[in-house]
Image (spheres, rainbow, N blue to C red):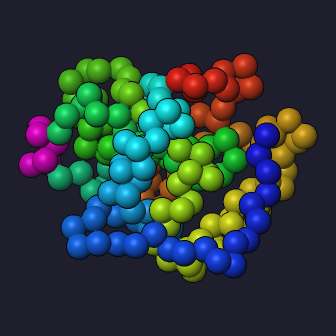
Amino acid sequence: MAHPLKMNDNFIPCPVAVGDELYPNGIFVFNITKITEYIQESADRVALGKVAVSDFPKEFSFINEAYVDSVDISKPVVLAEISPGRYTLIDGHHRLEKARRMGINSVRAYKLGVEQHMRFLISKEAYLAYVGYWNSKLKGMDKMGHSYDNKKIKDTVGTKTAEPYEPDRNTRGYW
């Protein structure tokens, strides 16, 4: 069940090195390079499953056509829990697009919970806003953690989120 996040006054933004890949989602900017390193070091603590390619829009506003053909679709995409039970694609847009063009129905995906990905925000301002955003989304949820409004939401760049967890499917590798 989703729980309110407590503000950590000692939050330290994720450092950004020259060459790090970043994913901007409005004020929330995630350090994808550091997330990838975390996944490699903590694979046993990160859920790995599959997502349907059709769950995401056909066009992304920032697809680099010259890059699509060169990506390795066997590398899992990364989803982040952006509000209780709702996930958005933060890494793997080109892989997902290539899979769609190849007629592949699903791709492997790492799924990071809020506690896992929040540490990769690159500013304290974004962290403070994120905690407030998360906690505001808890309003309107019942005791079982189901939202009264189960509409899919879009992030600021238009990527569609995966379906919320279903209680009977809340196990590693399935969502």
Q: Is residue 28 left or right of residue 8?
A: left
User: How many numbered marks are there?
Assistant: 0
Residue at image position (90%, 40%) is: 143
Q: Is residue 138 visible?
A: yes
Quadrant containing the N terminus in the rendered view: top right
- Could you tell whether 164 is left or right of 19 in the image? right
Q: Position of residue 58 (x, y in %)?
A: 34, 39
- Closest to the observer, 77 or 62: 77
- Residue at the location (32% across, 43% down)? 92
Q: Nearer the viewer, residue 113 or 17?
A: 17
Residue 31 horizontal side relative to residue 144, left or right = left
Q: Quadrant of residue 72?
A: top left
Residue 7 vs 144, above or below: the answer is below
Quarter assignment of residue 69: top left
When the figure is inspected, residue 140 is found, relative to residue 144, above or below; the finding is below
**Viewer-closest of 160 and 25:** 25
Q: Which residues are magenta?
A: 65-70
Residue 100 is left or right of residue 28, and the answer is left
* Closer to the camera in the image, 115 or 90: 115
Quarter of the image where one finds residue 85? top right
